Image: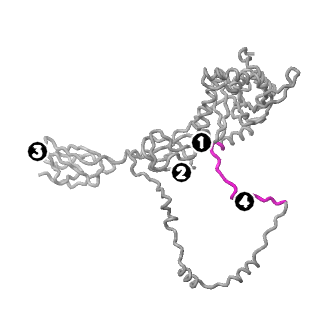
Amino acid sequence: MLGVLRRKASASCLGENLHVIRTAASTSRIPSAASEKIILIPRQCGRARNFSHRVLPGYSTNLRPERGAVANHHSSLTLQICSRPFCSNSGDLVDAVVPFMGESISDGTLAKFLKNPGDRVEVDEPIAQIETDKVTIDVTSPEAGVIQKFVAKEGDTVEPGYKVAIISKSGEGVESVDHVAPSEKPSEKEAPKPPSAVEEKKEEEMKPKVETTPVKEKSKETSPPPPKRSATEPQLPPKERERRVPMTRLRKRVATRLKDSQNTFALLTTFNEVDMTNLMKLRSDYKDAFVEKHGVKLGLMSGFVKAAVSALQNQPIVNAVIDGDDIIYRDYVDISIAVGTPKGLVVPVLRNAEKMNFAEIEKTINGLAKKATNGTISIDEMAGGSFTISNGGVYGSLLSTPIINPPQSAILGMHSIVNRPMVVGGNVVSRPMMYIALTYDHRLIDGREAVYFLRRIKDVVEDPRRLLLDV
């Protein structure tokens, strides 16, 4: 008969490998003539993986055979462990983590959750939004399943790889939020009953009698008179009428960059006015044919972009930038278009605008503006830029002094179109006029180049035929 092995099992129920069978100096405890198949079950290891060990003469094992587990005889002695898988729910839970946010972004703020615990989500479905200095990034679900719980909270500062939520692929163990029906509210369900007349009488008899009249007279005597306010003392509104809201990361970033621009650059602004008659007539004459062929409306911004490209090519210093003690001249024109969004100002970039026609400019601007408004614009679409155009006229601005977007050296400000009396050919006529402003870094750009730059934009906008003739 086969001797009973008294050794304890040295296996962990969490999946650690069983001890390797060691060579014993003593004689074999298992006769060589015996060839049996024994099923071993480790103690307290109900979830271990399946292992097979071949026991040879001269070797021992650290497992204990259960009674009645002897199987048929074979040519060699084989020991097997029959148990359940490694962990029943080890592959059911997955973590939703903060994705990579860009080269220049190291952290962000968890703005809000788009889902609740217990909600069903699909693969790559957004469950939360991370607000960074530049863009808003979605945290998506890596697997389809049910949100078990949220690990982070709204307002937390998170980094790439930070765990935000736990997703259960099977939907087990989900922390659901209990919603109480209006008819079962604790306030209504546990409302105290009004006391009866007998109970009220008993309570009045049990209360000690206190003379309240002297107390009232004493309080009247000791109460100090209200302070008299002087006529010049300002009366501030009560705190209840004020709201304190933390600044968004995008707004703080914009504020920092604009203040750095004022502290670094020698800002100077020059103005001019443009007669919009010919450009508006060009758009009116060809707007239907333009939409029919290109599928996009013909706007005024494409005309100003083409005019700015021509002016930057005529005055390359406006497209340059100071870098230490050097001046970097750019042989390309990447124009940033300032777009106002509900979360702040963003500036997507038109790459190689000098190679674009009117249709390509309009399509690119419309696509970038929609992304910026929806919060889906990427960092790469806003990086770089050699010159900026800001159109405050869409909001009704008549005149302004825009601030340079670092590290650029100039910015063009467009304003609203207003009919004003103008002298044309010795006659006073009504013309649609627009003020334009150029704010530039006076350390690099002199007034002469700035004025020539605005003059070129004025000439091209007032007579778009100059673009065809390059004059």
**Label annotation for residue 132:** 1
Please tell me whether mark 3 or mark 4 is closer to you in this view. Answer: 4
Residue 166 seen = no
Earlier residue among tags 1 and 2: 1
User: What SS does tag 3 mark?
Assistant: loop
Magenta residues, dominant SS class: loop
Earlier residue among tags 3 and 2: 3
The answer to the question of whether label 1 and label 4 lie on touching residues, with beta carbons closer than 8 A, is no
Which kind of residue does numbered mark 3 sit on? Answer: Ala
Residue denoted by label 2? 153
- Image point (59%, 37%), residue name: 374
- Image point (42%, 44%), residue name: 145
- Within 10 angstroms of label 4, few (less than 14), some, or many (20 or more) residues? few
Mark 3 → mark 2, Cα distance in angstroms = 67 Å
Residue denoted by label 3? 33
What range of the chain is rendered magenta? 232-252
**Label annotation for residue 238:** 4
Q: Where is residue 381, by image quadrant?
A: top right
Q: In terms of depth relative to the viewer, which is nearer, 75 or 389? A: 389
**Label annotation for residue 364:** none
- Within 10 angstroms of label 1, few (less than 14), some, or many (20 or more) residues? many
Image spot of residue 366 (x, y percent): 62, 30
Earlier residue among tags 1 and 3: 3
Image spot of residue 142 (x, y percent): 45, 40
User: What SS does tag 2 mark?
Assistant: loop
Q: Is residue 283 left or right of residue 50?
A: right
- Image point (58%, 43%), residue name: 131
